[in-house]
Image: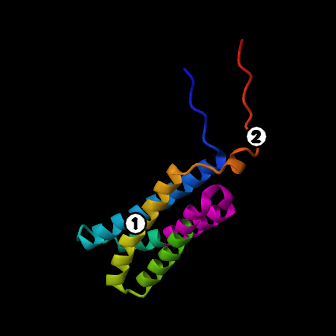
């Protein structure tokens, strides 16, 4: 039985970055919903998570920009838009503009979900796939 080949390293990086970003965004939504639902005082976790999510979003945009040929324009656009939206979200939270902060958070969940979905369905352009040439082991006799 043949195992399928590993994805190109660029796809592994992009998919990992998208997954970490989506995880941070979902964690933020979880802390916020627990806080708003009265399940305890989760404001501190939400504040710390905001910094983590902001750093991850900026790092993600940088990774997508660095691998832009592999990522494609849609994924790069979604990654940059996510970083910008999360920066706006962070600012809304710091300014305590709650109604917009909550609404913007819902939009961010959709945006980062789209980024993750598009990244996992993405295939590399032919010119990126061909370089460097894949090394295939010699078949055993």
Would you call the spot at circle 1 few (<14 residues within 10 Å), some (14-19), or many (20 or more)? some
The disc placed on residue 18 is none
42 displayed left or right of 92? left
- Residue at left 73%, top 37%? 134
Q: Are marks 1 and 2 in contact (CB under 8 Å)?
A: no
Quadrant in which the C terminus is drawn = top right
- Helix, strand or loop for the magenta stretch, by majority: helix
- Residue at left 53%, top 54%? 119
Vertical comparison of 84 with 128: above or below: below
Q: In the rendering, at what x and y percent does residue 8 appear?
A: 64, 44
- Residue at left 60%, top 66%? 59
Vertical comparison of 87 with 4: above or below: below
Instruction: Classify residue 4 by image quadrant.
Output: top right
The disc placed on residue 133 is 2
Residues 57 and 27: in front is 57
Q: Which residues are magenta?
A: 51-78
Number of labels in the image equals 2
Instruction: Name the residue furthest left.
Output: 38
90 displayed left or right of 33? right
**Gap in Å between the C-alphas at discs 1 and 2?**
37 Å
Instruction: Name the residue furthest front.
Output: 126
Question: Tag 2, which secondary structure?
Answer: loop
Would you call the spot at circle 2 few (<14 residues within 10 Å), some (14-19), or many (20 or more)? few
Foreground label between 1 and 2:
2
- Residue at left 61%, top 59%? 72
**According to the image, label 1 marks what residue?**
109
Q: In the rendering, at what x and y percent does residue 137 appear?
A: 73, 26
Question: Tag 1, which secondary structure?
Answer: helix
Q: In the rendering, at what x and y percent does residue 84 appear?
A: 53, 76
Vertical comparison of 1 with 77: above or below: above
133 displayed left or right of 69? right
């Amino acid at each position: 039985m043949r195992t399928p080949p590993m994805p190109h390293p660029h796809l592994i990086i992009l998919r990992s970055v998208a997954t970490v970003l989506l995880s941070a965004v979902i964690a933020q939504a979880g802390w916020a919903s627990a806080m708003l639902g009265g399940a305890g005082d989760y404001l501190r976790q939400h504040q710390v998570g905001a910094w983590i999510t902001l750093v991850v979003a900026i790092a993600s945009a940088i990774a997508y920009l660095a691998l832009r040929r592999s990522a494609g324009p849609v994924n790069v656009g979604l990654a940059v838009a996510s970083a910008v939206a999360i920066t706006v979200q962070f600012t809304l939270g710091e300014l305590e503009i709650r109604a917009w902060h909550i609404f913007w958070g819902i939009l961010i969940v959709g945006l980062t979900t789209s980024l993750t979905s598009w990244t996992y369905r993405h295939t590399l352009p032919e010119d990126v796939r061909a370089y460097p040439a894949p090394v295939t082991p010699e078949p055993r006799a």
